[in-house]
Image (spheres, grey):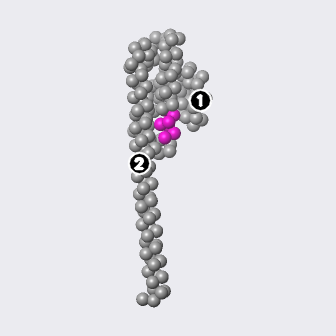
């Protein structure tokens, strides 16, 4: 085997090695993306559980929360103290909704979890106090998420 043949074999082996490396990197990127998705979904579940636990641990907050979600024809007005107790929960919930919204757009939140949170968001936005709170606080959230919430409020009024 002369030097030219050896060079041709070397090029072939090098080409195969490059293709193999690219396949390996592709698999690693796919695995990494899956791990990020799993981590984000777990973080969403943890955040959801945290504010529900906070609500259930505080009887007055739990009472205010139940009043917030009563059927429209059975709703009692919230007191000023109840509204104050609900504000941190609203911030936590809407931050979670926003993270899920953007995470889903980036492909890091599963569709079923995004759908679950979209349903929860619609339920929150059905409450007049939440709509008033959003009108005052919505600017603290991202523009695409604000547009999404605005469309939800508009569609719920139809």
Q: Dot 1 lies on which element?
A: helix
Q: Which mark is residue 36?
A: none
**Residue 145 placement (x, y as % from top left):** 55, 34
The tag earlier along the polypeptide, 1 or 2, is: 2
Q: Please tell me whether residue 80 belongs to the stretch shown in magenta.
A: no
In what quadrant of the picture does the N terminus appear?
Answer: bottom left
Q: Are the residues at dot 1 and dot 2 in contact (C-beta closer than 8 Å)?
A: no
Q: Dot 2 lies on which element?
A: helix
Name the residue located 58 percent from the left edge and 27 percent from the top edge.
138
- Residue furthest to the bottom: 2
Name the residue located 58 percent from the left edge and 35 percent from the top edge.
142
10 Å crowding of disc 2: few (<14), some (14-19), many (20+): some
The answer to whether any part of residue 126 appears in the image is no
Residue 62: quarter of image: top left
Residue 52: quarter of image: top left
10 Å crowding of disc 1: few (<14), some (14-19), many (20+): few
Vertical comparison of 8 with 117: above or below: below
| Residue corresponding to mark 1 | 140
Q: Which residues are magenta?
A: 97-103
The main secondary structure of the magenta stretch is helix
Q: Distance from label 1 to label 2 (Cα)?
A: 30 Å
Q: Please tell me whether residue 100 belongs to the stretch shown in magenta.
A: yes
**Residue 122 placement (x, y as % from top left):** 47, 28
| Residue corresponding to mark 2 | 34
């Amino acid at each position: 085997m002369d030097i030219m043949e050896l060079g041709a074999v070397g090029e072939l082996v090098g080409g195969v090695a490059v293709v193999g490396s690219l396949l390996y990197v592709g698999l690693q990127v796919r695995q990494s993306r899956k791990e990020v998705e799993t981590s984000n979904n777990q973080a969403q579940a943890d955040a959801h559980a945290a504010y529900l636990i906070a609500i259930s641990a505080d009887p007055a907050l739990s009472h205010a929360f139940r009043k917030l979600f009563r059927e429209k024809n059975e709703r009692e007005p919230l007191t000023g103290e109840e509204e104050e107790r609900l504000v941190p929960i609203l911030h936590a919930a809407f931050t979670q909704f926003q993270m899920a919204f953007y995470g889903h757009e980036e492909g890091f939140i599963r569709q079923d979890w995004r759908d679950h949170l979209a349903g929860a968001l619609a339920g929150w936005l059905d409450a007049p106090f939440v709509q008033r709170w959003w009108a005052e606080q919505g600017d603290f959230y991202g523009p695409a998420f604000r547009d999404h919430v605005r469309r939800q409020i508009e569609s719920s009024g139809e």
